[in-house]
Amino acid sequence: MTEFTPLTSAFGGMLIGLAVVLLMGSLGRIAGISGIVGTLFSSAPASEKSWRAAFLVGMIVAPTVLFLITGTMPVIEVPPTTAMLVIGGVLVGIGVSFGNGCTSGHGVCGMARLSGRSIAATLTFMATTAATVYLLRHVIGG
């Protein structure tokens, strides 16, 4: 089971919310990771690519900063097999394409803007997640 960490989780959620608000307030952009990454590999102007690259670098550098402050790295446990991770990644990519965005764009940013499309997408994500966990844990027995 996953450890219950309400204070750490709340603090992390506040940092995500702050980042989303700062990005929307300063650049008028939504912090959807699939859109941020996708534009890096397109023919977008350099000004669009620079802030997107900085955003992604920040996501990568943050654990290193945490290590320098605390002396420990976050523990990441990935119990599924490599094949399951690859299949899951492909399915997420397909879902991002069909859903016009990812969980961060719809769930964090779109829901905050009361976007009907994002509310529907987030409900779909959550229902699919619940069904998948139920099937894997209780029907298939994973």
Image (cartoon, grey):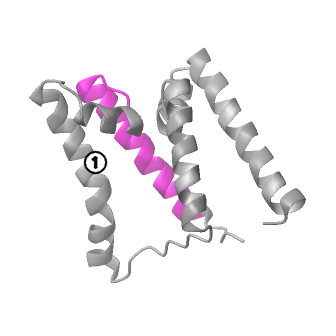
Characterize the magenta stretch by its predominant secondary structure. helix
Q: Is residue 79 magenta?
A: no
Q: Looking at the image, which is closer to me, 90 or 131?
A: 90
- Which image quarter is the C terminus in? bottom right
Question: Which residue is pictured at 52% across the width and 55% down the height?
Answer: 86
Q: What element carries label 1?
A: helix
Question: Which residue is pictured at 34% across the width and 79% down the height?
Answer: 70
- State which region is magenta: 7-31
Where is residue 8 drawn, in percent x and y?
Answer: 52, 64
On screen, residue 123 versus residue 115, left or right, reads right
Q: Looking at the image, which is closer to me, 106 or 93?
A: 93
Q: Quadrant of residue 40?
A: top left
Where is residue 48 drawn, in percent x and y?
Answer: 18, 28
Where is residue 57 drawn, in percent x and y?
Answer: 23, 53
Q: Looking at the image, which is closer to me, 70 or 127?
A: 127
Q: In this view, does 83 lie above or below 33?
A: below
Q: In this view, does 126 lie above or below 87?
A: above
Disc 1: which residue: 56
Q: Give the crowd class for mark 1: few <14, some 14-19, many >=20 residues within 10 Å.
A: some
Q: Quadrant of residue 72?
A: bottom left
Label tally: 1
Q: Is residue 69 visible?
A: yes
Q: Is residue 10 magenta?
A: yes
